[in-house]
Image: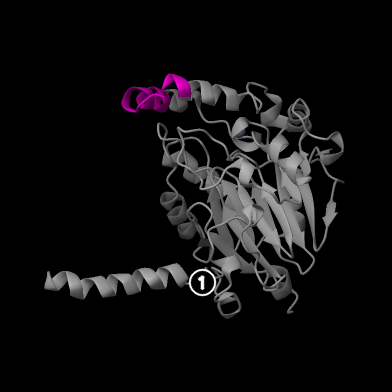
Amino acid sequence: MIKRFTVLPILLSVLGACATAPSSDPRALAVAQQAGDPGCSMPMLVATGGPAPRNPGTLAIRWTGFTNYELVYDGQVILLDTYFDRGSTFPPLGFSAADVKRADLILLGHGHVDHMSDAAFVGTRTGALVVGAPVTTEKLLTQPIPKAQVRTVTGRGGELMRFKGFTVEPILGKHGDPPPNVAKAFGDALRTTTTPPAPGQAAELARIRTLGISGDPRVVTEGTIAFLFTFDNGFRLMYRNSGGAVSEYEKAVMERVGRVDVALVAVSASYVQELTVKQALEHARTYRPDVYIPGHHDGSYNNLWRATEPLFQALKDDNPNIITVSRSYREPVCFDTENNIQRKRQGG
Ligand SMILES: [Zn+2]
């Protein structure tokens, strides 16, 4: 009993410190600025009523499963993908699509269900502009959403979009294409070793599946768009929501801009590390980010999460300076955008 009493206060103080610790810029450039800022520590989306960072130059990034992220910058809420109501076979995200009340911009990297199922619903209720490839917006417009809110981009150049304090450049990428023999082997193994969805859950999944594209080969070749954010102060962020090969369009853009500060990149769906590592290395060598934040590594209860640590290790073996960051659902990562590669290059 005595031991318990002595250990408990220590435990509580450790837990207390964790609960109040600020979520700092992984590059340790803005720790003081962000200290005590609820916008950089609260695990609640600004879209659902959480606090925005105090400093308008702070970029807050929250991951909410698959390649869904919320970006908050200078009072604006940007949602990357919209796949929130995933059904009861998935770990809960801590909020639902109905909780999302604020968004200014929604970017859909491609139109498979696990990237766009809530786009029409959230777009309509927030009034956000929703951007996607032709095959994506074609699917979106079969659902109830005002046509004027939907913008189609091809990612083939000349489509730079300007917003308050930043631009977004759509770039045609390529969807992942896992080897069928690997996908089949793992699929078979998972089917025989995990609990299958109950009939009600299967119906739920089938209903959600109708909200995205299935079986259209255009998604792979002309439906996957990477989005490059360039903030007016030079800070850059690349968003890439499928773990596919780098396209010629992406190579051309990166030759022009050099590097990005942050890359939000999907982990390849190829299961085996030999393949996922290879793909992550191609992404990192192309975007050359200071900070690599993976996505698409979570899964349903009867599927596998994609391990990020082997990727992180391989990326660091390739480039010891790269910073890898992976947080839980909704936990913010904040960046002081004033500190960026462009500025340093210009001696600013
Ligand atoms: Zn997909």
The secondary element bearing badge 1 is classed as: loop
How dense is the environment of label 1, judged by Cα within 10 Å: few (below 14), some, or many (20 and up)? Answer: many
- Residue 232 found in image quarter: bottom right
| Horizontal and vertical percent position of residue 293 | 55, 55
Residue 313 found in image quarter: bottom left
Question: What residue is at 69 percent from the left and 75 percent from the top?
Answer: 344
Does the image show residue 172?
Answer: no
Please tell me whether the stretch drawn in magenta is mainly helix, strand or loop.
Answer: helix
Residue behind mark 1: 22
In depth, the one of 32 and 221 nearer the eye is: 32
Q: Residue at x 70, y 30 (%)?
A: 221
- In the rendered view, tell whether residue 50 sits above or below residue 32: above
- Which of the pair 173/119 is nearer the observer? 119
Task: Determine if the magenta segment contains residue 278.
Answer: no
Q: Nearer the viewer, residue 321 or 155?
A: 155
Can you tell me which quadrant of the image ligand 1 is in? Answer: top right
Residue at screen point 39% across, 22% down: 188
Depth check: give the residue in front, 341 or 104.
104
Q: Amino acid at mark 1?
A: Pro
Task: Kindly indicate the quadrant of the structure image that contains residue 185.
Answer: top left
Q: Is residue 142 left or right of residue 48?
A: right
Please state the horizontal and vertical placement of residue 255, each as a whole percent of the image: 74, 54
The segment highlighted magenta reads 185-200
